[in-house]
Image: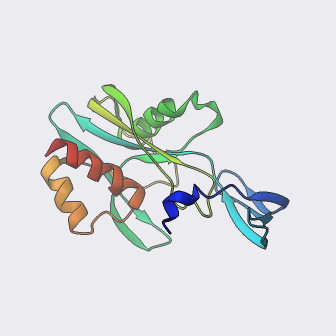
Amino acid sequence: MSNANLGDPQPWTVLQTKYLFRKPPWLTMRQDRVQLPGGGIVEEYYVWEYPTWINVIAVTKERRVVLIRQYRYALGQVHYEIPAGVTDAGDGGLEAAARRELLEETGFGGGRWQPWMTLSANPALQTNLTQTFLATEVEQLQPPNLETTEEITVHLVAIEEVKRIILAGEMVQALHAAPLLKFLLTQL
């Protein structure tokens, strides 16, 4: 018998929630007790709560993609990434947050903006989504305005070079590579 005839799985029922750690926006962890539609009980299901993350694929008028490189402590490595960050309560929306992050990390702004892709880092364990925007015809408006905890270099990369970077494993952040691959598929 095909699973297609059974319908979609149904939501679980939360029976109890206990917060184990709260340090927004970086880490909020809870333990839920849940009941599955079939009646089974999961006594300990752990969930990480994060605010929405935003990413920007920024392309200059000269058709260069604005990439950054920074050290990532957990991996102990430096890789290419697209400008990204966490939404703040005062941002006034997702695009405003994306514009702020691009300007802060790279000094680039302006241009034409559109929502590009929505992804989840791990829908089984995390509550947030990552919203990626495509910004075209951006230009350098100011020097980067980095936080004291950021050490970032900005790189203007030809579209063909972006393909090489991803295929060579020089970008390991999946939430950055996936929207760029979508972009490459629409450009090449």
**Residue nearest the viewer, comparing 157 with 42:** 42
Please say if 63 is above or below 141.
Answer: below
Q: Percent x, y for residue 174?
A: 39, 61
Query: Whole-percent x and y of residue 80?
Result: 31, 59
Query: Does residue 130 appear in the picture of this structure?
Result: yes
Does 4 sit above or below residue 64? below
Residue located at (85% from left, 60% from top): 15
Q: Left or right? Give the position of 130 relative to 27.
A: left
In the rendering, at what x and y percent does residue 129 appear? Answer: 54, 48
Furthest toward the front, the residue is 1
Image quadrant assignment for residue 171: bottom left
Residue 17's image quarter?
A: bottom right
Query: Which one is in front, 66 or 179?
Result: 179
* Res. 154 visible in picture: no
User: Which residue occupies 37% across, 54% down?
Assistant: 176
Q: Residue at x 33, y 57 (%)?
A: 177
